Amino acid sequence: MNSITAMITITILLSIILTTISFWLPQMTPDHEKLSPYECGFDPLGNARLPFSLRFFLIAILFLLFDLEIALLLPLPWGDQLTSPLTTLIWASTILILLTLGLIYEWTQGGLEWAE
């Protein structure tokens, strides 16, 4: 048995053992305290299904949009090693300019203002 087969066998056995232990160890005795919604140690006040402000979702979408900058600019060090690093610089500058224009637009439209 070679080392790769042994490593795969040990990995599978360890996964199965840990999965079965995780199902046997917890105590499955739900009571009123465990089933009640948690609100920082206080008794829940009112309905837990109140709608959120759309401002939360807007901020989350903006974060995801501008967080893509990291994913798009991450391969830059490898792109500089190409035969034409000027193309990499142009694409990176284009991405940064577009994101900066988007940020300016959101700022002027009031999308980043939390309180009105």
Image (cartoon, grey):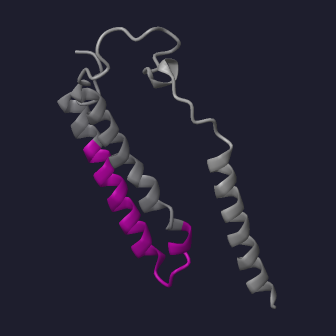
Quadrant in which the N terminus appears: bottom right
Residue 36, percent across and down? 44, 20
Q: On the image, which quarter does residue 25 sit in?
A: top right
Q: Position of residue 7 (x, y in %)?
A: 76, 78
Q: Nearer the viewer, residue 53 or 71?
A: 53
How many numbered marks, from 0 up? 0
Name above or below for residue 56 compared with residue 89: above
Q: Nearer the viewer, residue 31 or 18?
A: 31
Above or below residue 55? Residue 77 is below
Q: Is residue 63 above or below residue 97?
A: above
In the image, what residue occupies the spot 40% across and 11% down? 44
Q: Residue at x 34, y 38 (%)?
A: 60
Q: Is residue 45 above or below residue 85?
A: above
Residue at 36% of width from left, 46% of height from top?
64
| The furthest residue to the front | 29
- Name the one closer to the observer, 68 or 86: 68
Give the quarter of the image for residue 47.
top left
Residue 84 belongs to the span the image colors magenta: yes
Magenta region: which residues?
A: 77-102
Query: Furthest residue to the left?
Result: 109
In the image, taking residue 32 as reference, residue 115 lies left or right, namely left
Let me know if residue 111 is in the magenta part: no
Name the one closer to the observer, 52 or 109.
52
Residue 9 in the figure: left or right of residue 46: right
Provide residue 50's location: percent of width, then percent of height. 25, 20
Give residue 46's quadrant in the image: top left
Residue under the image location 50 percent in, 62 percent down: 74
Q: Is residue 26 left or right of residue 105?
A: right
